[in-house]
Structure formats: structure tokens, C-alpha cells
Image (spheres, rainbow, N blue to C red):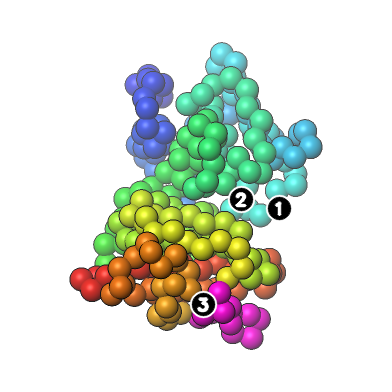
Amino acid sequence: MNKSFFYERRNPEWYADDLRKELGINDNSALDLDNVINALDIHLKQAPIQEGILGACKVKGLKKLIVISPDIYNNNQKRFTIAHEIGHLFIHHGVHFCRKEDFNMGINTKTKEREANQFAAQLLLPRNIVLNKLRTRDISLDIAQELSEQYEISLTSAIIRMIELSDENVALISQKNNIIQRVVKSPECRSILKNGKISNNTLSYITNVDKMRQEGYVDPNAWFEDSTYSQDTRCYEQTWYFSKLDMKLSIVRLEDDDY
């Protein structure tokens, strides 16, 4: 592999870009992680680690090791975990132990874990693919599902990837038992979302096992503090209910008159 790949650079996505270019990875299909592991001469194994640790990695000289917990049953989660650990190997070197919360895209405050997530996101789902989708379509759970199936990443990871790259005034809200659990906002979304229990004026409030998918316009005040948007602003909501997880995901978008 070209030695330029190992040069220190600030943006974690650049490492992933270099790797994809070096290996000639096709943007039209899911990344073959087995080929990447073999090309980088990484020893990958699945074995129990410390309690609460989902992934670990170590690099010493030319030897590189990634260990994945057998507690990871979902293939898409396993793929992101491996890509995250590859990021640690080439950006940070040394030894790393990663807990479940370290893989949370969009909210991680630990610099190294955030960088490893950025690397993994770009490796598995390059930004140009997402931006091409968003040039002609608004962010939606439908697009996220398409990306999830085509590139073998989780639905949540696909949504967050779109949110982070979007120039729309949009946010993702996950809920359980009608209580907001997590919020990820686009760079353009400066409005303040309400906390706690969701309003009965949201579509999410009536989304359930009988009505698992809802979308349409709602009062912006159902989701946002009324002092953070203009009087003419409209709010579009799309909510899906996931019965196996007993949780809901909502995408809410604020639209001005010129939208």
C-alpha cells in the first residue's frame, strides 16, 4: 500500500477516502469488509472482551488486531464496529476498547471515538453517495431504508449520516414509550426541540402497531419551542414504529415559505 496513506491528516474521512481509493472500492455496492481486512493484513477475531466492551483493537509495529464481541448479533452493527476499529488503527494507533455508547453517531463527545465513527461512516457510506440522493429528494426514512439495504448499514446510521450532511432544517428524534430518548439535528437546524414526553399534536403520538407509518404536516409547536422559528414556518413529520424494538423514529423538517 502507498505510504502516503499513513500520513497524518486532520479529517477522519480523508483516511477512509484514501483507503477506498487504494483498494479500488466500488461506490455502487456494499463494502466487502473481508477484502478490506485481508488487504490491510488485520487479524480479526470474535471473542469475549471485558464486560460492556463491544470492540477492541491493537496495533504494534506491523501487527494489527481487531476483536469483536460475540454479543453483537446484528450484521450491520458488526460491520460498523469493525469499520470503527479500523479507524482507530489508522488514525490513533495504540490500544482501544470501545463500549456501546462509543458507537453512537451524532452525539459522541469523546474525540477519538467521534473520529473513529466519522471514519467508519465514510468507509461504509461515502458522503458523495448521500449527497447525490439528497440533490433530488428530501430527507426521509424511505431513503434511509434504501441506503441501509444497499450498503449494509443500520437504518439509524443511514438517517444520521443524511442528517449530518444535510442543508435542510431537519432533525431525527427517537422515542420509546412516547418519551424522547435521543435527538440529532442537522447543521442548519438551530431551533430548540422540546424535551420529555411527546405532544399529542404530533403524528408520532398516534403511530403504533396498528398505524406503523405516519407522515404529514403538523403544528411546529408540537415538536419545537415556539420562539425558535418564524410565524410562517411549517413542520413536516415522518414517523415509523418498530415493533421489535418497541420504539419510534421521527424525522421532522421545518420549512419556510421559500422551501
The amino acid on which the numbered mark 2 sits, given as a three-letter code, is Gln
Residue reaching furthest to the left: 258
* Residue marked by disc 3: 202
As drawn, 239 above or below 57: below
Check disc 1 and report the residue beneath it.
Answer: 73
Q: Is residue 150 visible?
A: no
Name the residue rendered at 33%, 55% in the picture: 188
- Residue 209 lies in the magenta-colored region: yes
Q: Which residues are magenta?
A: 199-214
**Mark 2, mark 3: which one is toward the viewer?**
3
Q: Within the image, what quadrant is residue 43 found in?
A: top right
Q: What residue is rendered at 63% in x and 27% in y?
A: 96
Q: Residue at x 63, y 80 (%)?
A: 208
Q: Provide residue 159's location: percent of width, then percent of height.
A: 47, 59
Q: Which mark is residue 77?
A: 2
Q: Does 221 appear above or below 189?
A: below
Q: Residue 236: where, in percent of width, then height?
A: 39, 74
Cα separation between marks 1 and 3: 33 Å
- Identify the residue shown where x is 59% and y is 53%: 76
**Residue sitting nearer the eye, 258 or 83:** 258
